[in-house]
Image (cartoon, rainbow, N blue to C red):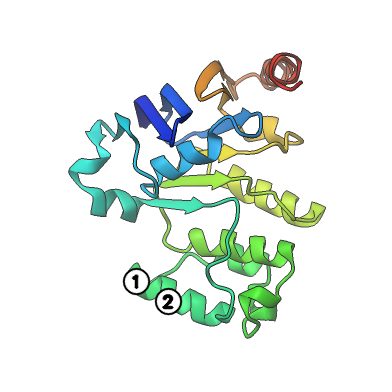
Amino acid sequence: MIKCQGIEKKFNENIVLGGLDLHVPENRISLLVGTNGCGKSTLLKIMASLVKEDKGEIYFSGKNKNSNPTQYKKDLSYLPQEINIFDQMTIRDIEDFYLSINNILNPNIVLRDIFKINTFDNKTFSSLSGGMKQKFMLSLIFMKNPKIIILDEPFNSLDIKAINDLTDYLVSLKRQKTILIASHYFNKLESLVDKLFIMDEGIIVQEENLSSSNSDKTNINFDRSVSSFFKNYVY
């Protein structure tokens, strides 16, 4: 599991995370929802070791992530909400670079095949449409076969077929990976999610266990929680 304990973060005098606690279950799929600006992306960047928390601790499988940061980063893949760093590189060059720096000899190419990345291998990243960029980045982060997967708005810019393909693939990973998804895309997620977290103003304000053993009850709990989210936190 990933355990965030008392996470605080300020930017200048703006409190983004105010002592947040979050327990993401191991080998389950969890969904994080919240209003724009509530701190979701900052939290995910802290969990991915891209932003340093001001206070608090993060644990993975009972160990502080800072006790072995190299191994933690090796075990984790993170999809940011926006990617602009590869603009003039070709897709093939980006892949080769990623595989090299992560010392990946046998990459997981399932999503690469599903999304037919080979059809635009020689294009530069900047020349791709938003959907093509998203497909490529999703295929890339799964290549190192990580234990922890953090996805910030993974359905952005995807067409319906790609959304269905990604959802099906994530379902196939249930009970194998620790996955945390931040998304406003609720359709079909009830078939995916084991735990729902609702975030507002820098803290977790509600969480719901969604048991997959009773699909009708799961759907009711999911719908009720999502309705609560819109009623109480979306103005």
234 relative position to 172: left or right:
right
Q: Which of the image's four quarters has the N terminus?
A: top left
Quadrant for residue 40, please give it: top right
The answer to whether the residues at label 2 and label 1 have Cβ atoms under 8 Å apart is: yes
Task: Inspect the image, locate mark 1, and give the three-letter code of the amino acid beneath it.
Answer: Ile
Residue where numbered disc 1 is placed: 101
> Residue at 70% across / 67% down in the picture?
132
Sort mark 1 into few (<14), some (14-19) or many (20+) by Cα contacts within 10 Å.
few
- In the displayed structure, would residue 136 be above or below residue 235? below
Quadrant for residue 210, please give it: top right
Residue where numbered disc 2 is placed: 97
Task: Inspect the image, locate mark 2, and give the three-letter code of the amino acid beneath it.
Answer: Phe
Sort mark 2 into few (<14), some (14-19) or many (20+) by Cα contacts within 10 Å.
few
116 relative position to 172: left or right:
right
> Residue at 54% across / 52% down in the picture?
80
- Percent from the top left, x then y, of residue 200? 58, 22
Q: Name, please, the residue furthest toward the left.
A: 67
Q: Which of the image's four quarters has the C terminus?
A: top right
Q: Name, please, the residue furthest toward the right.
A: 160
- In the displayed structure, would residue 160 be above or below residue 206? below
| Dot 2: element | helix
- Percent from the top left, x then y, of residue 191? 68, 33
- Percent from the top left, x then y, of residue 89? 55, 80
Quadrant for residue 227, please give it: top right
